Image (cartoon, grey):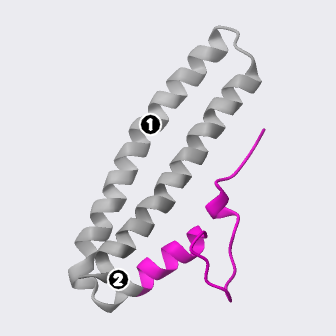
Amino acid sequence: MFELPAAYTRRSLYEHSENSSFWAFCVVGNWAQLMWKYMNPDVVALQTELELGFQEGVSEMDAKALKMLRESEKQEKVVEMLTDFSVGAGDSVFAGWKKLFARIVSK
């Protein structure tokens, strides 16, 4: 019933993987560090977009989960809904950072 986004379960300090969030974050950080002055706006824009989206999404999920629990919905359904939301959020962060790297590497 509980799961993690696949990209967050794959990591190695010694072997790069296109399917690992660890490496997606590392390559963006390492590349951005070279010319932070020029790449900072792109990094901040993505962080802001993700954070604002999650603030809204989490508020909606909390309200929906509370309503489901108050209406005697089975706890497993609520957990499944929240897990699906969290996995989707993790996947969107990973995809966003991969796209960000493609954008900043061409600056």
Query: Where residue 31 appears, x then y in whole percent?
Result: 38, 86
- Residue at mark 2: 32
Q: Residue at x 32, y 56 (%)?
A: 48
Say which residue appears at 30% left-offset and 66% top-offset. Answer: 44
Q: Quadrant of residue 7?
A: bottom right
Task: Provide residue 27's location: percent of width, then percent of height.
Answer: 47, 81
Q: How many marks?
A: 2
Residue shown at 38% from the left, 66% from the top: 99
How far, Cα to Cα, is label 1 from label 2?
28 Å
45 relative position to 30: left or right: left
Q: Is residue 31 above or below residue 86?
A: below
Label 1 environment density (alpha carbons within 10 Å; few <14, some 14–19, many ≥20): some
Q: Position of residue 45 (x, y in %)?
A: 27, 61
**Amino acid type, label 1:** Gly
Residue at 57% x, 15% y: name it: 67
Residue contact at pointers 1 and 2, CB within 8 angstroms: no
* Residue 16 in the figure: left or right of residue 96: right
Which quadrant holds the N terminus?
top right
**Amino acid at the residue labelled 2:** Ala
Residue 66, which numbered label? none
| 49 w.r.t. 30: above or below | above
Task: Give the answer, above or below, for where 13 lies relative to 81.
Answer: below
Q: Is residue 55 above or below residue 16?
A: above
Magenta segment includes 83: no
Left or right: 102, with 71 as reference point: left
Left or right side of 1 for 103: left
Q: Label 2: state its secondary structure.
A: helix
The secondary structure type at the circle numbered 1 is helix
Magenta extent:
1-30
The residue that disc 1 covers is: 57
User: Which comes sooner in the sequence, label 1 or label 2?
Assistant: 2
Name the quarter where the C terminus is drawn: bottom left
